[in-house]
Amino acid sequence: MRSQQRPVLDVTDLSHAFERDDGERTAVFDRLEFSVAAGEIVSIVGRSGAGKSTLFNLVSGLLKPQSGRISIAPHADGSAGRIAYMLQKDLLLPWRSVLQNALLGVELFRKVTREDVDRARSMLSKYGLHTVADAYPHALSGGMRQRVALTRTLLVDPNVVLLDEPFSALDYETRLALEDDVMSLRDSTGTSVVLVTHDIEEAIAMSDRVILLGGRPARIEDSIDIELSVHGPRTAVSARESAEFRTYHSRIWDGLRSTSIYHAGAPA
Ligand SMILES: Nc1ncnc2c1ncn2[C@@H]1O[C@H](COP(=O)(O)OP(=O)(O)OP(=O)(O)O)[C@@H](O)[C@H]1O
Ligand SMILES: [Mg+2]
């Protein structure tokens, strides 16, 4: 059913290389193709250095690809589609309050309105942060900081959200709670989510599809549709209890072990 929809994010023929100090060029991507459907949650897994963050930097426009096309479908009302990107580090600005940090993404696009402030406050409150809205980031725990960064990412009404290892610094319980938050965001708004994670369990629990990125230049080594039979609604916990979970886990683990980020003969 998903494949019949027009993709929300479409990446075609994406090529990019970095130049090393000695002038040698390393192709990170060579004509990579992939797309994400409306409301789909896709996880990208791959070894350290595989090119996951670089892919997000290219898709979000932070880096200009040497060639290729990245297109984002417009919103249902015809307005331009928007990508929101939560970087690998939370990057909260220490001199701005939690509320001001949450509004930073909106501020980069346009003047902040009273309605934006109200939305920010209510989203912070949904994440249990209403009591610290006027505090500064240094007063927050790691989990709270990630929630502020997530609020900032979501406030811009994106139709695609890129999350680069958003939960890696968090304790298990907080992590599961935030996984649920992202899944319910998708359910309530239809936002598509692309998630980079080193945690195979997280990738399986949250995703409709898991992509394994490997090789140099990086390619999609495997693309796995995740279908889990759960009792009741699919949540971070019920997904992990499903009968199929271990099978997917082994397939992804084996895939990761067999990928190399270097081709034979390339410098390690
Ligand atoms: N600005 C840069 N200049 C030169 N090389 C770079 C630059 N950014 C990334 N690279 C190289 O590109 C490759 C991919 O890096 P990237 O950060 O995308 O990997 P990653 O998959 O996100 O890794 P990790 O899981 O550790 O975050 C690495 O070999 C890295 O050294
Ligand atoms: Mg990275």
Image (tube, rainbow, N blue to C red):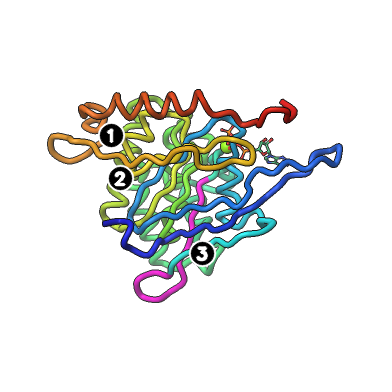
> Does residue 263 sit above or below 148 in this rendering?
above
The residue that mark 2 highlights is 183
Instruction: Answer whether residue 160 is magenta in the image.
Output: no
Q: Where is residue 67 shown, x and y percent of the image? A: 66, 59
In which quadrant of this rendering is ligand 2 seen?
top right
The CA distance from mark 1 to mark 2 is: 9 Å
Element at label 2: helix
How busy is the neighbourhood of tag 2: few (under 14 within 10 Å), some, or many (20 plus)? many
Tell me if I can see residue 145 in this picture: no
Find out whether the residues at labels 3 and 2 contact each other: C-beta distance under 8 Å: no
Residue 161 is situated, as x and y percent measured from the top left of the image, at 44, 52
Which amino acid, by three-letter code, is at mark 1?
A: Ala
Q: Secondary structure at mark 1?
A: helix
Amino acid type at circle 3 is Ser
Q: Which residue is mark 3?
A: 71
In magenta, the rendered stretch is 74-86
Label 2 near label 1: C-beta < 8 Å? yes
Q: Residue at x 40, y 61 (%)?
A: 7
| Residue nearest the viewer, comparing 228 with 171 | 228
**Residue to which mark 1 is pinned:** 236
